[in-house]
Image (cartoon, rainbow, N blue to C red):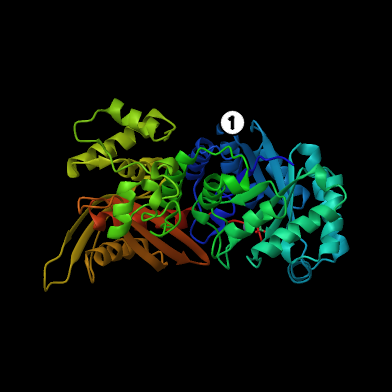
Amino acid sequence: MSDKLIIFDTTLRDGEQSPGASMTREEKLRIARQLERLRVDVIEAGFAASSHGDFEAVKAIAAAVRESVICSLSRANDRDIARSAEALKGAARARIHTFIATSPLHMEKKLRMTPQQVHEQARQAVRYARNLCGDIEFSPEDGYRSEPDFLCRVLETVIDEGATTINIPDTVGYAIPELYGQFILDLRRRVPNSDKAVWSVHCHNDLGMAVANSLAGVMIGGARQIECTINGLGERAGNCSLEEVVMAVRTRRDYFKLELGIDATQIVPASRMVSQTTGFVVQPNKAVVGANAFAHASGIHQDGVLKARDTYEIMRAEDVGWATNKIVLGKLSGRNAFKQRLQELGIDLDSEGEINAAFARFKDLADRKSEIFDEDIIALVSDESVTPEHEHYRLLSLAQHSETGERPQARVSFAAGALEHQVESDGNGPVDASLKAIESRVKSGAEMVLYSVSAITSGSTESQGEVTVRLQHGGRVVNGVGADPDIVVASAKAYLSALNKLHSKAERVAAQG
Ligand code: KIV
Ligand code: ZN
């Protein structure tokens, strides 16, 4: 059995299914490039048939990323599969991933199909897909809750039809490590042609065991592919977290004895990028990528680490991409220095126009903040206003007044398409007044379900504030993110960014619908 562990990243597909995490084509492309720098083996770029936007995103990623295999999800029908094949045409290496539910509950209640019909549809789907692409992954959705005899028959059939990877999802996060590992092992032993495919694990985190289950699937079950997402992003409690499985396998190489192609120094930049793009903030005590993951507060620990690092550290912060807070640029830095720093951070802006827009924002920030850190630069390019041509709403200026004992007032001017609006409101605080002013004109009717502020760089009130706003409207949930040294301005940007997402009205077919 191979000792190479394939890392299949599904941040852009399963991760994006978290309410509010939907991303634009440009955002997905930026993250895909970072995943390529991270050297993930397979990038699931989207679900091409789910929407025009997703089709375009898969197509753009297939054209831009050359090192990783690019994959598109498809339900088990000809239309979805043909759409994936079409979107993947430009890929250096393409994979079509097709799935159909096989658990009694899903077949009866969701699909309203008999097991025989599901079996036949799986056969037809893989046969059709295999004519379009040499690399085919098949997933029996809710596989872990499927009846093993039936599942073995379906898997034998799809491998006969040419499936090259067999992925066993624990769709609802119900598994327990030992049982899931044993389940995979039993399937591999019972399916007569199991050696013709790579076996893969795909675990959800509803009981907090997605990473443990995935690793058990590898060690007990013999799987050689793990499906995971950056920061564990994903519906409900999320998916198996890439940074955790990768660092577990790497740190405990003595036990796992598996090879990984990953460049771990790109983990923290990838985590920052995904959290800034989606507005899903990483909890401070999150393993590997949380702000406190390498912070030692207690005197005893600090003393120990100063004397010998490995007294309390099993990994080195710099090995996973934590740069010590470096002042990288300042007010006097020129365009070339800025461009070079972007390159060093692995940020490829597509055009000179984008670089110029980002540089203008950098200059603006440097006028107001004396020290610019790497995190500031990442926030600056993640900010959607770098690509104004794609935005409907844009903040032009904001003035607010607040004084003890008086009700705060805000005046905001913003663009909506070609029109400029000037609006005013009062509110409980300056943020409330500013957002009420915008809403008084936009009249989105959206409900705000989350508002959060955090400092981009710690240690000083000079830091930029990063604001996330989550809006819910007509069954859709969107996140907007804005960054600025002035948190009222950051809030207005975040609100407009969320309104832009509502405005774009991307309709999607749910992958598990
Ligand atoms: O969780 C799941 O079952 C999935 C499949 C579509 C692979 O994401
Ligand atoms: Zn999933």
User: Which of 164/495 is in front?
Assistant: 164
Whether the residue under disc 1 has CB within 8 Å of ligand 1: no
Residue bearing the label numbered 1: 66
> How crowded is the residue under tag 1: few (<14 C-alpha within 10 Å), some, or many (20+)?
some
Q: Is residue 355 visible?
A: yes
Q: How many marks?
A: 1
Ligand 2: give its quadrant: bottom right
Residue 29, x across and y down, in percent: 51, 40
Query: Could you say which is closer to the camera, residue 81 or residue 291?
Result: 291
- Residue plotted at (64% across, 33% down): 91
Left or right placement of residue 301 versus residue 63 in this view = left
Q: Quadrant of residue 322?
A: top left
Secondary structure beneath label 1: loop
Question: Could you tell me residue 364's position as x and y percent?
Answer: 23, 40
Q: Quarter of the image containing the N terminus? A: top right
In the image, taking residue 294 as reference, residue 135 lies left or right, namely right
Image: 160 above or below 279: above
Residue lying farthest top?
336
Q: Does 59 sit above or below residue 405?
A: above
Q: Amino acid at mark 1?
A: Arg
Q: Nearer the viewer, residue 467 or 318?
A: 318
Give the image location of residue 174, x and y in percent: 65, 68
Q: Is residue 505 visible?
A: no
- Residue at 19%, 31% in the rendered image: 332
Vertical placement of residue 344 versus 14, above or below:
above
Give percent across and percent down for residue 427: 23, 70
Which residue lies at the image location 33% right of the left edge and 36% below the top edge? 357
In the image, taking residue 117 as reference, residue 306 lies left or right, namely left
